[in-house]
Amino acid sequence: MPASRLIILGVAFAAAGGAGYVAKNMVAPPRPAVVEPAPKAPQIALQDVLVLSGDVPMGSTLGSNIKWESWPADAVNANFITRTDEPEAAEKLKDSVARVAMYAGEPLRRTKLIGEGQSFMSSILPTGMRAVATSIAADTSAGGFILPNDFVDVIMTRRADTGGAGTGFVTETILRNIRVLAIDQTIQEDEEGKKTRVGQTATLELTPQQAEIITVAQQMADRLTLALRPIVDAQEKAGDEADYLVSGNGRRGTVRLIKSGEISEVGARK
């Protein structure tokens, strides 16, 4: 066979082999893409915290309204009760009494509970204040619309000699912006959401001086009336009070005497 023909056949075989290789690669499945694993999110440290599982009214026991709940460790306050520090707290605190109203979902704090051996009323009184009860009726308490934690003015009405015109009445606001602690034995609005409560006795939060004023006024007055104030006035400072009814404010040398609704002042022995 001539050499030129051999060369042509060799070139043809090489071309055919190259075409077959190209065709094989074209129909071969693509290589799967390499998927790199996603970086793992940092794990959040959790801690079990004692929280309220239901609303607890002021003055009620916690009962079954507490449970352990996982919280991010970074969000745990030093005042929270944790399972790590007090594993038996849920059982020990179920009979504790709420000093204030507490609501589902909030962490339990011991500062909101009444200490062992304390009475409820003494535990909710701020330092230096006194709880004083005074008789009321529907017509002297805003028609029964006064509720615990409302603020009131105390108005005294008494008979007075008006000279030739005979006996009349004198009315005076003796205490201003006073918080109502309780109506009778009720220290909060009932669970049924009633908006009125007609009681016989209101317990007021007073300073020692105010306690003396209302004690004297109860003896002098024909009637004491509670006037309901707007809630926006709760932070308003009390104004002038009837401190002339008691021998305070540095007047140590006199004693106030009340007879037949009239006040007289006599010297006191030291």
Image: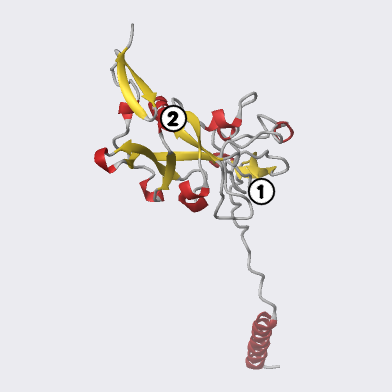
Residue 224 placement (x, y as % from top left) = 43, 40
Mark 1 → mark 2, Cα distance in angstroms = 46 Å
What amino acid is labelled 1 in the image? Gly
Side (left or right) of 257 relative to 149: left
Residue sitting at 48 percent across and 50 percent down? 139
Residue sitting at 58 percent across and 40 percent down? 184
Does 248 sit above or below residue 65?
A: above
Side (left or right) of 110 relative to 252: right
Residue of label 2: 219
Viewer-side residue, 223 vs 192: 223
Q: Which residue is the extreme one toward the left?
A: 164
**Disc nearer the start of the sequence (1/2):** 1
Viewer-side residue, 134 vs 54: 134
Residue sitting at 56 percent across and 50 percent down? 197
Q: In what quadrant of the picture does the C terminus appear? A: top left
Give neighbour class at mark 1: few <14, some 14-19, many 20+ (Cα, 10 Å).
some
Viewer-side residue, 166 vs 73: 166
Give neighbour class at mark 2: few <14, some 14-19, many 20+ (Cα, 10 Å).
few
Q: Is residue 137 visible?
A: yes
Q: In what quadrant of the picture does the N terminus appear? A: bottom right
Q: Are marks 1 and 2 in contact (CB under 8 Å)?
A: no
Residue 149 placement (x, y as % from top left) = 49, 43
Does 220 sit above or below residue 198?
A: above
Q: Disc 1 vs disc 2: which is toward the camera?
A: 2
Residue of label 1: 54
- Label 1: which secondary element: loop
- Name the image colouring: secondary structure
What amino acid is labelled 2 in the image? Gln
- Label 2: which secondary element: helix
Residue 226 placement (x, y as % from top left) = 43, 44
Number of numbered discs: 2
Specify the quadrant of the image occupied by residue 76: top right
